[in-house]
Image (tube, rainbow, N blue to C red):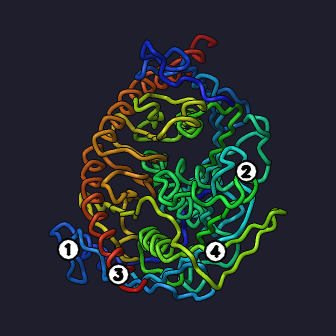
Amino acid sequence: MSHTPSTDMITPKLKMLTIINMLKKGMRSTGRGLLDFRPIEVVLGYVPNADGSALVRLGNTVVVAGVKLEIGSPYPDTPNEGALVVSAEFMPTASPTFEPGPPDENAIELARVVDRALRELKAIDLSKLAIIPGRKAWVVYVDIYVLDHDGNLVDASSIASLAALMSTYLPKVEVDEAGNIRVDRSSKVSPLPLNHKVVTVTVSKVENVLFVDPDLEEENMAETKLIVAVSDDGRIAGLQKSGSGGLTESEILAAIDIAIKVGNDLINLITSKTLKQN
Amino acid sequence: MEKPRLIREDGLRHDGRRPNELRPIKISVGVLNKASGSALVEYGATKILAAVHGPREIPLRHLLLPDRAIIRCRYHMLTFSTHERKSPAPSRREIELSKVIRESLEPVVMTEMFPRTAIDIFIEVINADGGTRTASVTAASLALADAGIPMRDIVVGVAVGKVNNVLVLDIDEVEDMFGEADMPVAVAPSLGMITLLQLNGVLTRDEFVEALKLALEGANQIYRLAREALRNSYLKVRVEE
């Protein structure tokens, strides 16, 4: 059962009012503007045993995403395609408010939002992932672990997932006449086929001010936020209003325009960072 | 299931509706005996029962807030509400929807009037034919109103979809399954506030603007029906006197 959260960090009222007053003047505590992300660091191949991985630092938020490719049976309605499975966990290392145990509603929501953006855009070309059409195909597992929480986990996770997928290579596969599959993970033959790139841009609202990439304090005082998945061709690949509170029609349109612009810059930034390392 | 022709040659949808036409909507308020408030809402073959208990004290005191009530919400599907039997274990989808539905109602409920209590909302999907979360929002907000809980507005939900490149209002399961996009929206029309917005699919900015407009028009129609149903539930009491 979902309930109004009661374990959120408490921010002193004086500090809260200061942050709100600054936001209204277009300023942030760290000197960045309303539409500026914090510095982003992407470390590809952070987990050598994964088929693709990326550690992303977004300010003080740290997320690691890993890709594992496994051979599985295709879904009956898409017999000639691979499959995508996205999951997320908020580790107790990330915050004193995170408990060990199965993913809570926030982790489930995050994973499903990232999943929908990748899936609906057909970001991964699943049609090229059949091994024995109708019988065996690659299953792409994207697993996201939040290691340190200083706000904006969804965007950090979507960046980490994209970077991890962009660094994933398919291993060499041989199928003999009897239909036995032999995988040689030591030789990586081709990059995971991608059709599109996609990131989410979460636009937060405090009073009438819209801004991106909140740190934890800003996030806790935001009335609500709109997560916008933006594709590399400037389309909207998913939306999710998250958090109590509402938005007017004009606020939503403004948020979407912000997200499309910022998202495009983010995709270019991640692409250049991954190209350098790949 | 075979993919039907989603937009027919005459421009109508597979069930004969125009693109901007809702399914037949039935709303009854106060349908349960023991709940503080309840509502039964049908959008076509989608059938949702919502019950509200409270504001009430709960044993889990650590959850309660000193300055307002908490809202607890469960979106739940009956095992036989879908084509394939739904496992009775809570699914990831149900967990996510319980959250977004709760968050669509929080802004309108005057929780500050009932500190240290819980308002519990139970939503049962009796039959699923698309648009279950949006019908759930409508049902839950009417159940809250029926419970006499002060609210700033009633929230109503409706989904817009894109099928065969046409934006259509209040999509059913076939249109959701074979269409290109599904965008559930919930609105508090008098406040001019959108309290639930999701998009499963890909839209251009222009398509989104169109889709949101279509959703708001649909929501206004449902809002009128919802208010009428609420009023009728009180009229009945007066007649019985």
Distance from the alpha carbon under mark 1 to that under mark 4 = 37 Å
Q: What residue type is disc 3 on?
A: Lys
Q: Report whether A221 appears left or right of A5.
A: left
Residue found 70% across the figure and 51% down from its top:
A75
Distance from the alpha carbon under mark 4 to that under mark 2 = 21 Å
Residue with the mark numbered 1: A33
Q: Residue furthest left?
A: A25
Q: Secondary structure at mark 2?
A: loop
Q: Residues within 10 Å of mark 4 (few under 14, many from 20)?
A: some
Percent of width and height locating residue A62 = 47, 83
Residues at marks 3 and 4 on the same chain: yes
Residue with the mark numbered 4: A68
Circle nearer the viewer, 4 or 2: 2
Q: Where is the C terminus of chain B found, in terms of image quarters?
A: top right
Which label was assigned to residue A273? 3
Circle nearer the viewer, 1 or 2: 2
User: Which quadrant would residue B1 be assigned to in this image?
Assistant: top right
Kindly check if marks 3 and 4 are in contact, taking CB atoms under 8 A apart as contact.
no
Q: Report whether B84 appears left or right of B11.
A: right
Q: Secondary structure at mark 1?
A: loop
**Location of residue B128 with respect to A112 vertically, above or below:** above
Q: How many numbered dots are placed on residues in this image? A: 4
Which label was assigned to residue A134? 2
Q: Residues within 10 Å of mark 2 (few under 14, many from 20)?
A: some
Kindly check if marks 1 and 2 are in contact, taking CB atoms under 8 A apart as contact.
no
Return the disc, 1 or 3, that comes first in the chain's sequence.
1
Distance from the alpha carbon under mark 1 to that under mark 3 = 23 Å
